[in-house]
Amino acid sequence: MTVEREQEYVTTVLGTGSYLPERVVTNEEIEARVPGASAEWIADRTAIVERRYAAPDEAASDLAVHAARAALDQAGLDADGIDFIIVATTTGDAPIPSTASLVQLALGAHRAACFDVNIACTGFVTALSIARAYVALDPTTKVLVIGTDVWTRFIDFGNRATSVLFGDGAGAAVIGSVPHAPGDPEGGLLNVELVSRAEAHELISMSAGGSRRPASVETVADGGHLLSMQGRGVRDFVLDNVPGLIAGLLKRSGYEPADVRHFVPHQANGRLVVELAKVSGLVRADTHLPLRHSGNLGCASVPVALDAANRSGVLRDGELVLLAGFGAGMAAGAALLRWTVTEGGTR
């Protein structure tokens, strides 16, 4: 008697997309605006030579919609085929409604449940872990995960350490499942590791605009609505915490750092990311750094870098791809994927 096996599935990326605003801002323009920041100094310290600024009429949801449409197109899906929209952002359109709900409206994704995730630059990886759980419950589920930020409206141009880093943009991925044949290597989204270190929360902050310090003439005057970041402390946090997180994720998944073929990190600072890859032992991995022409995009950094790698064709079927985010909170997260090419040829 033949016993039929229940179909097995793996959770994977069905399509990616990204969007960068049209306005290009060079290091020379930043030099003219920020005291003590020469174009050469910026490039040397950050590996950034230009970044994109959103137009005056563009908000986080507008950037997100562009990226989402590109991801849906690559996945071969209509917006009505999406069950959940998860938007990772720290600079949403407004405190309420959720930015995800505005994306739903613009896309016409009428079936989707929508919510935001606010964990700064770890947000996209965190949203991926939530999407993975939804798809695990029901393999027919499709989740649109978006990272979007418009940080250039919240930076202090009198502060050389932060104002040279940031740009605006959005990246997206459609998460779903594909059939998996018994005996084949496990593919798709293999594992996720997330940590929070709240004792270090003061390293990156925006002190005003919430219930503790509501907006007022005084909070505007003292810069409470602008980003504050302790650069050296952030660097130390990343190098002290993220390599161990990556090592734990890989060990739990049955791999070594040398097995990773592609490293797609948060685009915080080029020098820092290169040092992170070295300390983490990712000696065989290609570290993807589109920040040279986009800057630090906050929640959008990881999905924009992933889309750039995907569309360039360098991600091959079966290769291990490691995503990593880290930022305010302080929080960090990493996700390990075995890249899977779907039947339609999208990734």
Image (cartoon, rainbow, N blue to C red):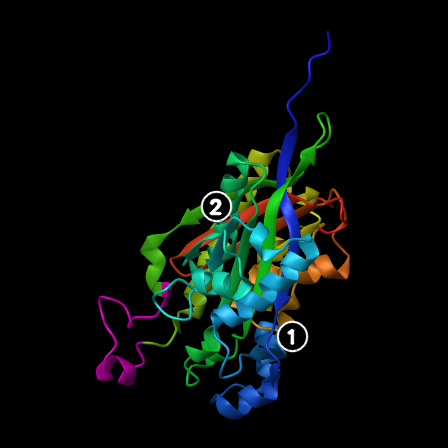
Q: Mark 2 points at which residue?
A: 130
Say which of marks 1 and 2 sits in front. 2
* Disc nearer the start of the sequence (1/2): 2
Residue that sits furthest to the bottom in the current view: 32
Label 1 neighbourhood size at 10 Å, few (<14), some (14-19), many (20+)?
A: some
Q: Quadrant of the N terminus?
A: top right
203 on left or right of 56: left
The vertical placement of 311 against 37, above or below, is: above
Q: Is residue 108 magenta?
A: no
At 44% across and 57% down in the image, what residue appears? 237
Q: Mark 1 points at which residue?
A: 293
Q: Distance between the residues labelled 1 and 2?
A: 30 Å
Image position, residue 192 (x, y; %): 53, 43
Q: Can residue 197 be seen in this view?
A: yes
Q: Quadrant of residue 293?
A: bottom right
Secondary structure mostly seen in the magenta stretch: loop
Residue type at mark 2 is Ile
Q: Give the range drawn in magenta.
A: 203-224
**Nearest the eye: 276 or 191:** 191
Image position, residue 341 (x, y; %): 74, 46
52 on left or right of 196: right
> SS class of the residue under badge 2?
helix
